[in-house]
Amino acid sequence: MPPAPSSSEALRAPLVVEFPFTRSLGPVQSAFLTGLRERTVLGVRTTDGRVLVPPVEYDPVTAAELRDLVEVAPTGTVTTWAWNPSPSRGQPLDTPFAWVLVRLDGAGTALLHALDAPGPEAVRTGMRVRIRWAERRTGAITDIACFTPDGDAAAPAAGPAPHSGEFTEPVRGIVAPARLDYTYAPGRAQTRFLAALAGRRTVGERCPSCRKVYVPPRGACPTCGVATAEQVEVGPHGTVTTFCIVNIKAKNLDIEVPYVYAHIALDGAGLALHGRIAGIPYDQVRMGLRVTPVWTEDGRYPDHYRPTGEPDADYDTYKELL
């Protein structure tokens, strides 16, 4: 078991928030992404004749529905750029590259993507570039692996050509993984809170003005706006103020449904905190139920709360904590 955090040292930990966003596609977006899979770049013509790439389904000026698809060239011109010396996880290239806005030949707007170039001295506004297609294409913007320099090649004489937008096995939906990697520093107040939990104690901080005890502590009173420093041990018993019954099993969470998640006002606290209720049938959990924590095997934090067997708390004792 790792050592408990010291109450004097501020903690830091790498955290990841990730959410796979699933969305369906309308006819225009479906045609655009399916076209990329087939090495075809489609735009849409607006009511005033402009060609938008990537295409949208409604005119950004008039809000009119747009369906007039056209095919543009895989070559274009850099309108602006910025050098990226240190690519991050999930970016198009794993070596230094330039972010570029490229107006493809036949388009009236620019497309953001990566340009594979040996260095910033090789990139300039106005340079000609060409799409490098990914070897494996699935119907996503990543089917364009990147852009590459195209020398002094001139723009093709022909303009955008009409396109039906029809393909075999069109892409109907996509999963877009949203991910945020960051380092979390809880600060001194929550570091002290976590250090106390490691000793199976729950500690809050009292506001010197309104005298409310905040658990977990924030280092300042959100109501009065003043710093909090006085530590107050609360609990371990508490009262269920409100609760909900969870019927949908969360991914990677080894808890059988249904189960109860509740707001619990620990004795002495001026704010209720979240906790799972166990040790009682879910349909017997109620407001006013008296509970006590059951700690994890390593004793670092409460795994859940169970009934104490005491009589239910009177509503007037917790009504201000709902």
Image (spheres, rainbow, N blue to C red):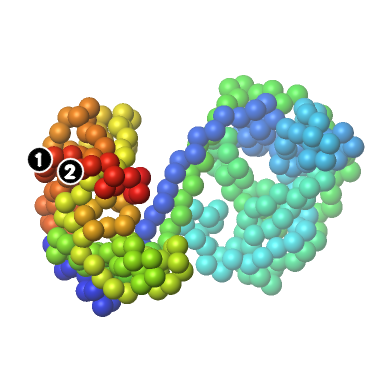
Q: What is the secondary structure assignment of the residue under circle 2? A: strand
Location of the N terminus by quadrant is: bottom left
Q: Residue 121 has which mark?
A: none
Quadrant position of residue 206: bottom left
Q: Residue 290 has which mark?
A: 2
Residue 84 as seen in the image, left or right of residue 3: right
Please identify the residue farthest to the front as the structure is shown. 316
Q: Can residue 10 be seen by looking at this rendering? A: no
Give the mark nearest the N terminus, 2 or 1: 2
Q: Are circles 2 and 1 on residues that touch, CB within 8 Å? A: yes
Quadrant position of residue 128: bottom right
Q: What is the secondary structure assignment of the residue under circle 1? A: loop
At 23% across and 64% down in the image, what residue appears? Answer: 203
Q: Is residue 208 above or below residue 135?
A: below
Disc 2/disc 1 C-alpha distance (Å): 7 Å
At 34% across and 66% down in the image, what residue appears? Answer: 211
Residue 287 as seen in the image, left or right of residue 38: left
Q: Residues within 10 Å of mark 1 (few under 14, many from 20)?
A: few
Name the kind of residue labelled 2 in the image.
Arg
Q: Can residue 108 be seen by looking at this rendering? A: yes
Front-most of 217 and 295? Answer: 217
At 20% across and 64% down in the image, what residue appears? Answer: 233
Front-most of 320 and 216? Answer: 320
Residue 234 location (% of width, % of height):
21, 60
Q: Residue 309 has which mark?
A: 1
Name the kind of residue labelled 1 in the image.
Gly
